Amino acid sequence: VVAPVGEEVLYRGMLFSPLQKRWGNSVAVVITAIVFGAAHMDPHYFIPLFGVGLAMGILRAKTKGILLPAIVHVVNNAAGIALMLFTQGNT
């Protein structure tokens, strides 16, 4: 819970707001998604993480806040962890 909420504060809060003020929602969404994907430092996952970053950025732009993106981010991470746990050894 802490990591996704912290990431939302950083990317969709501290980074998004100044970008949005200067260049608008579209640029803020794309730049924060790029930074979000790159920050995870795994080229294999850049595209899916970029997609998650786009979704979170769109939620941020539409709701004008970080609460919903943070909740969705927590749920997304929890689902990924659950899938890993429940599929281990079942391949």
Image: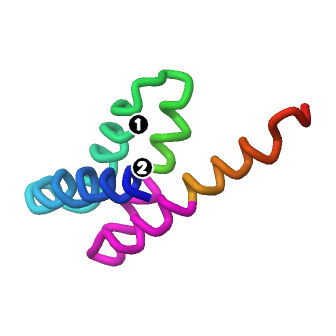
With respect to residue 64, does 1 lie above or below?
Answer: above
Residue occupying the point 34% across, 32% down: 39
For the magenta stretch, what is the residue range? 53-75
What's the distance in space between the residues labelled 2 and 1, CA to CA?
7 Å
Question: Where residue 14 appears, x then y in whole percent?
Answer: 16, 55
Q: Quadrant of residue 61?
A: bottom left
Please identify the quadrant where the C terminus is shown.
top right
Question: Where residue 87 appears, x then y in whole percent?
Answer: 82, 41
With respect to residue 34, does 14 lie above or below?
Answer: below
Question: On the rendered structure, is 17 left or right of 8?
Answer: left
Say what amino acid the circle numbered 2 marks.
Gly
Question: On the rendered structure, is 67 left or right of 79?
Answer: left
Q: Residues within 10 Å of mark 1 (few under 14, many from 20)?
A: many
Question: On the rendered structure, is 2 left or right of 64?
Answer: right
Residue occupying the point 55% across, 39% down: 48
- State the SS at label 1: helix
Residue that numbered label 1 is attached to: 37
Q: Nearer the viewer, residue 5 or 19?
A: 5
Say what amino acid the circle numbered 1 marks.
Gly
Residue that numbered label 2 is attached to: 53
Q: Is residue 9 on the magenta stretch? A: no
Please identify the quadrant where the N terminus is shown.
bottom left
Residue occupying the point 38% across, 50% down: 3
Give the numbered dot on residue 25.
none
The answer to the question of whether label 2 and label 1 lie on touching residues, with beta carbons closer than 8 A, is yes
- State the SS at label 2: helix
Question: Where residue 85 appears, x then y in whole percent?
Answer: 74, 44
With respect to residue 37, does 16 lie above or below?
Answer: below
